[in-house]
């Protein structure tokens, strides 16, 4: 008997069909991958299994768990199953964790709600589970709050919560999308170990085909609410019988056509940059300790060049980016753009600041949701004299990134993630900068949307002669779109050079460890059928 059997699951919301006859099975201790692009219905499938569909959703079909039809269970009985027999890990741990509660209380809460332990016993189990997910008590006491942890550490807390009652099925919805490669590898190893040691089944929802290749024994491919192909992972990845599956693979390995027009001279120069932060005093009258987040970094970017800056979380990438953009002051060294000094705060001339723009990882979080797109895209004009033809320029910028001029009259929530990122690029382009800093700009996008955005960036670079600084933990993206790469560790640049040379013949052990931690589809799985 299967642990979980989904039979002909269909779902509509506001008259729109979200799922259409979805069927699959997961056995005990099995890792099952569910892949597809954004909007394919992956997360709604997981919510249907958990009984957490929105009130306006209308569903049909069956979801059987250990022979019980979950679709027919009343909410009270489903509450008894959630967290107990079925656990779930969400993509963004900061939104899944309560910022007002300690990590110990949050892990223990699962046991207390299900009355599985006394308060003292629940705390002891919480300590045990946090130790199990790699957060030992000597460094991570139960009294810590979520904001005191890194993204990877918060995800470990979320996993500890999900496994506190040793569920038979764990659903992981994009659990590693926003994590750097080494942290991602640690989380995936942890999940793999948990399924082995606890005989727990894992339903892994992701758009990353390489992650599925390394984790799942079976996989299903979801397109527009329908499973178009499913089977044993190795066999499916080799044959790719369905056209949509082949398109997903092509997008995951996609490299945009680039014709770099790199000009001589330095557009951006960073010379011995130092950025320090004061840490809390260890005792009341003790002096402040200092954290040197950027430690004597030097680099150059030439006009028209694409440079990648890679490293794991906490290495100093974002701190260096903020200093380059004039958002954070330096305690040593200097930064120049076109020969002019970059300074932090209001002392930086507006016309100099206008020569640099930024595209963030989360476009929704970087826009004011109360304003329409026309106003949002026109925001950079506060750095220069506002032209009389603002509307025409906004329309042209939107059309240049593949959107319609009429989109300026919509709100940001009316767009998909890929469309929002296009709007963010339009905003960065509208005052024609020389340099665009892309801070994890495509890491949260599914493979097909990512390929479209990378194509767009390559085209815009060629037409406008832009220079790019790609700040990313995704080494596969960096390899596809940059001319040179800089590897950062603990505030220092430990290796740099032409991108292909660094990836093919990395010299520093840290660089080699990053490349080794990057998920990859085995070469022997890349044999495809004649239809490919």
Image (cartoon, rainbow, N blue to C red):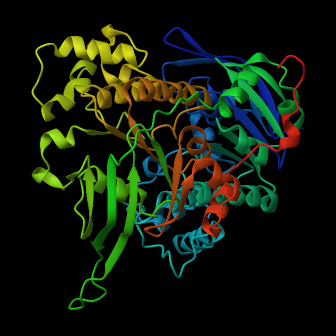
Query: Seen in the image, is 390 located left or right of residue 111?
Result: left
Of the pair 341 and 133, the residue shown nearer to us: 341
Residue 131, position as x, y percentages in the image: 62, 72
Which of the 4 quarters of the picture holds residue 274?
bottom left
Above or below 483: residue 49: above
Of the pair 11 and 361, the residue shown nearer to us: 361
Query: Seen in the image, is 114 located left or right of residue 391?
Result: right
Q: For the point 77% across and 48% down, which residue is it?
A: 215
Residue 266, position as x, y percentages in the image: 35, 49
Q: For the point 30% across and 13% down, which residue is it?
A: 396
Q: For the point 61% across and 70% down, which residue is it?
A: 125
Residue 371, position as x, y percentages in the image: 22, 24
> Is residue 521 shown to the viewer in this render?
yes
Query: Seen in the image, is 311 located left or right of residue 319?
Result: right
Query: Seen in the image, is 116 located left or right of residue 337?
Result: right
Of the pair 338 and 185, the residue shown nearer to us: 338
Q: Quadrant of the C terminus?
A: top right
Q: For the point 55% across and 33% down, which residue is it?
A: 52
> Is residue 99 shown to the viewer in this render?
no
């Amino acid at each position: 008997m299967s642990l979980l059997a989904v039979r002909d699951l269909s779902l509509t919301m506001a008259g729109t069909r979200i799922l259409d006859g979805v069927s699959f099975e997961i056995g005990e201790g099995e890792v099952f991958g569910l892949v597809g692009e954004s909007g394919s219905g992956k997360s709604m499938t997981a919510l249907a299994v958990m009984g957490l569909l929105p009130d306006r959703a209308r569903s049909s079909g069956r979801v059987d768990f250990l022979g019980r039809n979950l679709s027919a269970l009343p909410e009270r009985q489903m509450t008894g199953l959630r967290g107990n027999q079925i656990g779930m890990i969400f993509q963004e741990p900061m939104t899944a964790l309560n910022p007002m509660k300690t990590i110990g209380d949050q892990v223990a809460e699962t046991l207390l709600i299900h009355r599985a332990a006394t308060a003292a016993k629940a705390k002891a189990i919480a300590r045990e589970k946090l130790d199990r997910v790699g957060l030992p008590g000597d460094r991570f006491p139960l009294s810590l709050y979520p904001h005191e942890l890194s993204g990877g550490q918060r995800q470990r807390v979320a996993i500890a919560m999900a496994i506190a009652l040793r569920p038979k099925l764990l659903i992981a919805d994009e659990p590693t999308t926003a994590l750097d490669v080494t942290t991602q590898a640690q989380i995936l190893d942890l999940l793999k170990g948990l399924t082995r040691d606890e005989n727990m089944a894992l339903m892994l929802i992701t758009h990353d085909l390489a992650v599925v290749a390394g984790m799942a024994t079976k996989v299903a491919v979801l397109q527009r609410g329908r499973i178009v192909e499913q089977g044993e992972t190795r066999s499916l990845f080799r044959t790719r019988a369905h056209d949509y599956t082949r398109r997903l693979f092509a997008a995951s390995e996609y490299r945009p056509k680039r014709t770099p027009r790199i000009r001589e001279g330095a557009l951006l120069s960073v010379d011995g940059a130092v950025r320090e932060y004061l840490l809390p005093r260890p005792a009341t009258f003790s002096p402040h300790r200092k954290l040197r987040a950027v430690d004597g970094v030097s680099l150059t970017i030439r006009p028209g060049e694409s440079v990648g800056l890679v490293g794991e979380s906490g290495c100093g990438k974002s701190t260096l980016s903020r200093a380059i953009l004039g958002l954070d002051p330096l305690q040593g060294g200097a930064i120049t753009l076109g020969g002019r000094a970059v300074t932090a705060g209001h002392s930086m001339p507006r016309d100099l600041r206008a020569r640099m723009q930024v595209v963030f990882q989360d476009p929704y979080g970087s826009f004011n949701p109360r304003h329409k797109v026309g106003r949002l895209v026109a925001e950079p004009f506060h750095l220069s004299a506002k032209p009389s033809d603002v509307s025409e320029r906004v329309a042209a910028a939107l059309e240049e990134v593949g959107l319609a001029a009429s989109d300026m009259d919509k709100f940001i929530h009316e767009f998909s993630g890929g469309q929002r990122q296009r709007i963010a690029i339009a905003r960065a382009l509208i005052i024609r900068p020389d340099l665009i800093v892309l801070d994890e700009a495509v890491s949260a996008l599914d493979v097909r949307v990512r390929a479209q955005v990378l194509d767009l960036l390559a085209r815009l670079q060629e037409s406008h002669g832009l220079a790019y600084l790609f700040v990313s933990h995704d080494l596969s993206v960096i390899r596809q779109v940059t001319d040179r790469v800089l590897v950062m560790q603990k505030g220092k640049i430990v290796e740099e050079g032409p991108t292909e040379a660094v990836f093919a013949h990395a010299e520093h052990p840290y660089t080699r460890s990053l490349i080794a931690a990057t998920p990859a589809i085995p070469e022997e799985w890349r044999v495809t059928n004649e239809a490919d």
